[in-house]
Amino acid sequence: MLLHVPGVLDDASLSRIRKTLESAAWTDGRETVGPQGAGVKRNLQLPDGSPVRHELGQLVTAALAASPLYFAAALPLRALPPRFNCYQGGGTYGLHVDGAVMTPAAPPGQVAATMRTDISCTLFLSEPDEYDGGQLVIHDTYGTHEVKLPAGDLILYPSSSLHMVQPVTRGARLAAFFWIQSLIRNDAQRRMLFEMDTAIQALTASGENSAALLQLTGVYHNLLRLWAET
Ligand SMILES: O=C(O)CCC(=O)C(=O)O
Ligand SMILES: [Fe+2]
């Protein structure tokens, strides 16, 4: 499932992130990728150990925690701390698939927890009119999707899909990106749960208060219980 989550960042967080990134020390994005990706990746990233990445990543994580839509769609078990990238001057990331398993660096003294990547996310930090190109192109069984969203908006898509970022030929495209291991590994099951949750929320918001709604809520939780891997 491809899902657009609008307004993840408010104006204050967005401008703080943008301002901090203006003077950040960027490095070659190929530092965090395997050999297949390295052949097609031409962008800049904040280094994984950079304090700026850590500080801004916490802002993004806090904003995500306040987004019911993100939560309902992703059903996150764990997520890789957000990274930040920048494409400019023809910068691009050719067609690739994200690594299936990642091991985020652990704080000193703690054992690193390896995670499976079920969902990939890009949080756009530049407005679409600030740059030319830079569409995130995602291939799935329904075809090819070109994504270029307002600053502060997030796209969530299955990590199993092939995807690319088209060359940025004017201006700069800033983004945060990260991966999620979901409670629900299977994309089709996760989508059904999301649709059921959305329907339950809509009925609840309309003032519905019936035994049938309670039963439907029970089915949602029982499917989650049946399918969730923790
Ligand atoms: O910049 C983006 O939108 C996606 C980046 C990406 O695909 C990756 O780093 O694996
Ligand atoms: Fe990717």
Image: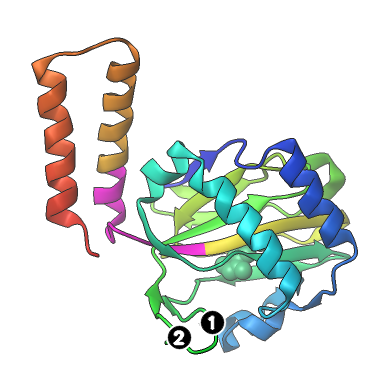
Determine whether label 2 and label 1 are within 8 Å by CB.
yes
- Part of the protein shown in magenta: 179-191
Of 118 and 61, the residue lying toward us: 61
Circle on res. 107 = 1
**On screen, residue 189 above or below 88:** above
**On screen, residue 105 above or below 186:** below
- Cβ at disc 1 under 8 Å from ligand 1: no
Q: Residues within 10 Å of mark 2 (few under 14, many from 20)?
A: few
Q: Name the residue beneath numbered marker 2.
A: 110
Q: Position of residue 216 (x, y in %)?
A: 14, 28
Residue type (three-letter) at the residue carrying disc 1: Pro
Left or right: residue 28 versus residue 118 is: right
Left or right: residue 132 versus residue 179 is: right
Left or right: residue 81 versus residue 173 is: left
Residue at 49% of width from left, 56% of height from top?
139
- Cβ at disc 2 under 8 Å from ligand 1: no
Residue at 62% of width from left, 59% of height from top?
58
Q: Residues within 10 Å of mark 1 (few under 14, many from 20)?
A: few
Residue type (three-letter) at the residue carrying disc 2: Gln
Q: Quadrant of the C terminus?
A: bottom left
Residue 23 lies in the magenta-colored region: no
